[in-house]
Image (cartoon, rainbow, N blue to C red):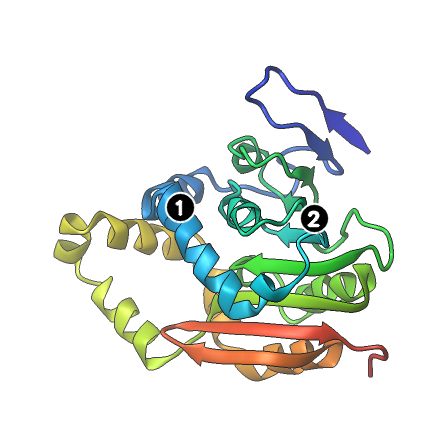
């Protein structure tokens, strides 16, 4: 494991478990992601999600990891809710360097998590699984790793895109160039979809397999589908079929 030292007081410390750029990333996607919503808008969105996931009811000293954490909006949301033992994992060093969360950050592949067995109480993902290049194999690898690193009573929380009627409508609207010209957020979303289209469409086309894998590793406690998203909270199963 390599660690990148802080260049100054404002640069986060990142533990490097892979070499930067060996697995990702797409700079055009990252620029669109930054345009899609402001950091504060993203944080407020994540706070609402975390409350719906049930995180607000958990002890604040549990060890929590966010996978595919990006620039850290989800980690800041957790911090604002009072959580103190936070860690983030992402493949993009560019996005990790934008973190100002004081969380422990890992440049790592979520298919090979840098955590010991049964070491975390909760793992959270805000829209990262649909970026996986191979389904269902990569999803199984990530879920298996999450299952491994969670404690006996640990929980898994995920929000991902889901092909609801609303999402189909959004896709249709984004086909109109005039809409993208006058609505910057819509244009940013369209660019993000364009740059991840292969993995995004593969994810949306396999809902049954995805749910079966979620249910294989975790006992669902909350599962809501609507407005183009699935929100899933599950507790670690003690045995996996």
Considering only vertical position in the picture, is 116 above or below 151?
above
Q: Residue at x 77, y 52 (%)?
A: 112
Identify the disc placed on residue 93.
none
| Secondary element at image label 1 | helix
Considering only vertical position in the picture, is 221 above or below 198?
below
Q: Residue at x 31, y 55 (%)?
A: 190
When asked about the image quadrant of residue 237, the answer is bottom right
Identify the disc placed on residue 33.
1
Considering only vertical position in the picture, is 60 above or below 30?
below
Q: Position of residue 81 (x, y in %)?
A: 54, 52
| Cα distance in 3D space between marks 1 and 2 | 20 Å
Q: Position of residue 118 (x, y in %)?
A: 85, 60
- Residue receiving disc 2: 109
In the depicted view, which residue is nearer to us: 97 or 200? 97
- Locate residue 189 relative to residue 124 in the image: left or right: left
Q: Position of residue 95 (x, y in %)?
A: 52, 37
Q: Reading the chain from its start, which is encountered first: label 1 or label 2?
A: 1
Q: Residue at x 55, y 80 (%)?
A: 223
Q: Residue at x 67, y 28 (%)?
A: 13
Picture mark count: 2
């Amino acid at each position: 494991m390599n660690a990148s030292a802080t260049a100054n007081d404002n640069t986060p410390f990142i533990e490097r478990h892979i070499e930067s750029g060996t697995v990702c990333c797409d700079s055009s996607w990252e620029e669109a992601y930054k345009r899609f919503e402001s950091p504060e808008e993203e944080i407020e969105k994540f706070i609402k999600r975390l409350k719906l996931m049930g995180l607000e009811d958990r002890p604040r000293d549990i060890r929590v990891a966010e996978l595919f954490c990006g620039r850290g909006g989800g980690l800041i949301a957790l911090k604002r809710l009072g959580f103190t033992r936070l860690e983030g994992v992402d493949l993009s060093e560019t996005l990790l360097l934008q973190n100002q969360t004081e969380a422990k950050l890992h440049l790592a592949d979520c298919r090979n998590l840098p955590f010991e067995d049964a070491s975390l109480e909760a793992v959270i993902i805000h829209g990262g699984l649909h970026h996986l290049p191979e389904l269902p194999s990569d999803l199984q690898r990530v879920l298996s790793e999450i299952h491994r690193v969670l404690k006996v009573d640990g929980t898994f929380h995920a929000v991902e895109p889901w092909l609801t009627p609303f999402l189909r409508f959004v896709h249709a609207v984004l086909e109109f160039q005039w809409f993208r010209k006058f609505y910057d957020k819509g244009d940013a979303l369209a660019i993000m979809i364009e740059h991840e289209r292969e993995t995004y469409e593969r994810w949306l086309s396999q809902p049954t397999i995805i749910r079966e894998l979620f249910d294989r590793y975790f006992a669902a406690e909350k599962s809501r589908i609507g407005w183009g998203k699935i929100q899933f909270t599950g507790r670690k199963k003690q045995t996996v079929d």
